Image: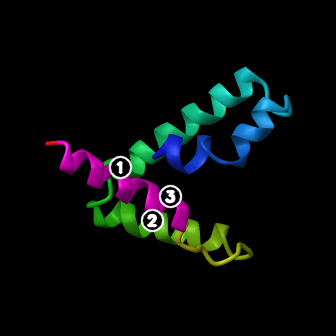
């Protein structure tokens, strides 16, 4: 998830252009991976889920509404289809 949703995005272009150093990229990705792991590992804990919802609701008040990334969806479904057909 970290690779597909964070690393393999515009941030990779910034890294290539030198706006983010290797050390900064490494630090960012470590935080992202650890946070995603924490959320996924605790997704079924109702207290954690409620706390995350409250925290997120207050934090993202001025963010745009999310949209489905059709290119990522298509890419992943294509990989799954090719994998299944190769079995």
Q: Could you give the CA–CA distance between mark 3 and mark 2, rounded to whole angstroms? A: 29 Å
Q: Position of residue 85 (x, y in %)?
A: 19, 50
Specify the quadrant of the image occupied by residue 47. bottom left
**Residue at 45% over, 62% down:** 74
**Residue at 38% over, 65% down:** 49
Q: Position of residue 37 (x, y in %)?
A: 40, 43
Choose between 46 and 18: the one closer to the eye: 18
Colour setup of the view: rainbow
Q: Which is more N-terminal, label 1 or label 2?
A: 2
**Residue at 70% over, 38% down:** 12
Q: Which residue is mark 1?
A: 79
Specify the quadrant of the image occupied by residue 50. bottom left
Q: Is residue 72 magenta?
A: yes
Q: Which residue is mark 2?
A: 51
Residue 22: which disc?
Answer: none
At label 3, counting other C-alpha atoms closer than 10 Å, the crowd grade (few under 14, some 14-19, many 20 or more) is few
At label 1, counting other C-alpha atoms closer than 10 Å, the crowd grade (few under 14, some 14-19, many 20 or more) is few
Residue 72: which disc?
Answer: 3
Mark closer to the observer (1, 3): 1
Left or right relative to 80: residue 87: left
């Amino acid at each position: 998830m970290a690779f597909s949703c964070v690393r393999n995005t515009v941030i990779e272009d910034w890294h290539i252009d030198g706006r983010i150093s290797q050390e900064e990229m490494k630090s960012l990705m470590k935080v992202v991976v650890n946070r995603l792991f924490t959320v996924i590992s605790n997704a079924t804990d109702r207290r954690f889920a409620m706390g995350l919802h409250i925290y997120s609701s207050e934090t993202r008040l001025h963010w745009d509404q999310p949209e489905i990334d059709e290119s990522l969806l298509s890419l992943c479904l294509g990989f799954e289809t090719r994998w299944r057909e190769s079995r």
